[in-house]
Image (cartoon, rainbow, N blue to C red):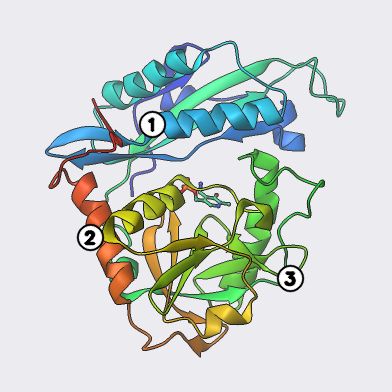
Amino acid sequence: MAFKADKIWMDGKFVDWEKANIHVLSHVVHYGSGVFEGIRCYKSNNKPAVFRLDDHLKRLYDSARIFRMLPEYSMEDMKQAIIDTVKINKLKDAYIRPLIYRGYGDLGVDPLPLPINVAIAAWDWGRYLGEEALEKGISAKISSWSRGAPNTFPMMAKITGNYVNSQLVKIDALQDGYDEGIALDRYGYVSEGSGENIFIIRNGVIFTPPSSSAILAGITRHCVFVLARELGIKVKQHVLPRESLYISDEVFMTGTAAEITPVTKIDNIIISSGKRGEITKKLQDEFFSIINGKVKDKHKWLTYI
Ligand code: PMP
C-alpha cells in the first residue's frame, strides 16, 4: 500500500502531501479534539466511485455537532472537496480521510476558542488487500478493555480521542496473537471490534448489538441490514452475551476497511466449522456485486466521479 498521494485539501486549498503539516501545539494533538471519517472509493466499471458518501458526510457532521465543532464548510462544500481530492490525485481504488480538528492558538483544555480546521486526504488503497481474510476469516479475542460507559465518552461519534480505546483493544489482541479484538460494553455485553461492528448468525437469523451497546453505528453495518432484508434473512438488533459468540453458526465483522470479514476463531474457540459461513458469503457477494457495478446500484450507494 502506497501511503502517499500528491495533494491534501487543507482549509480550502490543495497543498503538497509533504507540506500538509500542523503545529505540534495544535489542540487536537494533545487532547484528541477532532472528528473524522474513513471512506472508500472503489474502481467500479473502471470509474472511481465513492461508497455511501452522503451517509459518511452525515455521520461526520453528526460527530461534529455532538462535539460542538461544526466547521464553516457546509456538507455540500465538503462533498465537493472530497470529490476534488480524489480527482486531483487521479485515484480509483482509494481510502479517503476527512478530518475536522481543533487547531493552534491556545493549549488550555477548553476547545471552544480554538479554530476549527479541516483536512481531506485520499490515497491509493488496492481493493484486493485482505482478500485472504475475506475468504478464510480472522481470529479475535474478547478484549480486557471495555468500550466507554454511557455518559463518559460519546461512542456514537467518530471522535479522534475515542480511538485511544480502539488502540488499546487492538494492541491487546495483537500482542496475544489474534488478528482483532472485540470489546464488551460496561455491562459485559458484546459491543464491537476496534474498528468494526460485529454480527452473529444462529439458526438462520442475524443478530448484532444495538446502538445502546456503545457501538459506532457503522455504515457497512447498515448495508448488511439492507442486503439481508433483500435476501429474506432476518436481522435483529439485540444485546448479546459474550458466550453467544462461541456457539454461533457464523460470525462476521463489518467496516469500511474490513468490508465484510468472517471471524472463524474467538478466544481460541473455533466458530462452527471454522470456515466462512454460507450467509456471510451471500452477503459478501451481494455487497461486492454492487461495488463492482455488476448489479444495479438501486440504493444509490455509489457516487461516480
Ligand atoms: N466501529 C468503529 C469503532 C469503527 O471505527 C468503524 C469504522 N468506521 C466501524 C465500527 C464500522 O463503521 P463503518 O462501517 O461505517 O466503517
Task: Tell me whether circle 1 and circle 3 mark residues in contact (CB < 8 Å).
Answer: no
**Amino acid carrying mark 3 in the image:** Gly
At mark 2, the secondary structure is helix
**Amino acid carrying mark 1 in the image:** Leu
Which mark sits nearer the N-terminus, 1 or 2? 1
- Residue 33 shows which numbered tag? none
Residue 45 is drawn in which quadrant? top left
Disc 3 from disc 2: Cα separation: 33 Å
Is residue 24 shown to the viewer in this render? Answer: no
Q: Is 262 positioned to the left or the right of 217 in the image?
A: left
Residue at horizontal 22 percent and vertical 46 percent from the top:
290
- Residue closest to the eye, 112 or 90: 112
Residue at horizontal 49 percent and vertical 23 percent from the top:
19
Disc 1 from disc 2: Cα separation: 21 Å
Q: Residues within 10 Å of mark 1 (few under 14, many from 20)?
A: some
Residue 161 is drawn in which quadrant? top right
Residue carrying label 1: 53
Would you place residue 35 above or below residue 81 in this image? below
Residue at horizontal 23 percent and vertical 38 percent from the top:
298
Would you place residue 277 above or below residue 70 in this image? below
Disc 1 from disc 3: Cα separation: 34 Å
Which mark sits nearer the N-terminus, 3 or 2? 3
Residue carrying label 2: 285
Q: Is 276 positioned to the left or the right of 102 in the image?
A: left
Q: Residues within 10 Å of mark 3 (few under 14, many from 20)?
A: some
At mark 1, the secondary structure is helix
Residue carrying label 3: 188
**Amino acid carrying mark 2 in the image:** Asp
Q: Position of residue 260 (x, y in %)?
A: 37, 60
